[in-house]
Structures are given as C-alpha cells and as structure tokens.
Amino acid sequence: MIAYFSSSETVTRVLQTLITFQSGIKGTEALMKIEDLSPLYNLTTAQPLALSVLHHALSNAAARPELHALLQEVCNAVISELLVRFQEYDAVPLLELVADLLPRLPPGVSLEQCPWRTIDS
C-alpha cells in the first residue's frame, strides 16, 4: 500500500529522519559538511523541527573532539544564517538554541571574531 503525505507531513518525516541520522558521528559530520543548507535554514522559522536538526548537529559536534575543527567552521555560518532568517520572526527559539549551545562549546572553539556578535546601532 502506498501512503500519500501532505507536504507538511513529508517535511516533518524528513526532518525526523535527519535527527535520527545524526545519532551517530558519521551522520553529524555528513550534515555539517553539506555546503548549502539553505532549504533547512528556510524551514526554521515555520518548522521547529528544522531548528532542532541544526541544534542536534551543533551539540553533537561539540561533544565529539574529532569534530571540533569542523564545528569551528560551521557554527558561525549556521548562527549567522539563522539570524538572517529570524529577523522578522519570533526569535525566542533561536535564542534558546544559542543559549543552550554556547556553554557546550569546547574551549578550542572560539566565536570571538564572529560578525554576528557585533550589534549595529
């Protein structure tokens, strides 16, 4: 029997699969190496599960020393992209992600030079 899903149901299942895929180090590493995550970023304001996918990837990478160099590269890009997406939306979910992630970052991962840390007046 073939099941047909609405677009919303399909997106939810794909996002759930991405979270499951990241349960291992290889899945987290693969997701973080994707060059264009625009489709995922675009979903984050309307689909909380999309933000969870990114949160899991960054948190999992923070917990794995072998992914710290990749985390250094990717973390700034992810947060910068999310800031752009959430400019006209309720940013509380993004704030929660950043508040949870920052204490998890290992000492070797520095966000000191990140442009998103500067607030323009």
Image (cartoon, grey):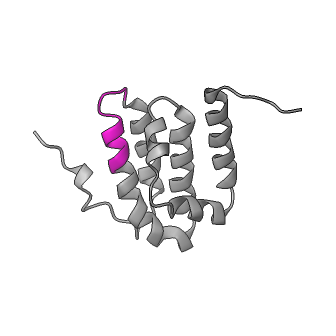
In the image, residue 107 above or below residue 38: below
Residue drawn 32% across the image and 60% down it: 111
Out of 102 and 113, give the one closest to the viewer. Answer: 113
On whether residue 99 falls in the magenta region, the answer is no
- The answer to whether residue 81 is left or right of residue 61 is left
Out of 114 and 21, give the one closest to the viewer. Answer: 21
Quarter of the figure that contains the N terminus: top right
Position in image of residue 42 (x %, y %): 44, 39
In the image, residue 12 above or below residue 24: above
On whether residue 83 falls in the magenta region, the answer is yes
Residue drawn 23% across the image and 55% down it: 115
Position in image of residue 37 (x %, y %): 46, 51
Q: Residue furthest right?
A: 1
Quarter of the figure that contains the C terminus: top left
- The answer to whether residue 19 is left or right of residue 66 is right
Residue drawn 39% across the image and 66% down it: 73
Position in image of residue 112 (x %, y %): 27, 61
Out of 71 and 84, give the one closest to the viewer. Answer: 84
Task: For residue 80, say whether it is visible.
Answer: yes
Q: Which residues are magenta?
A: 80-90
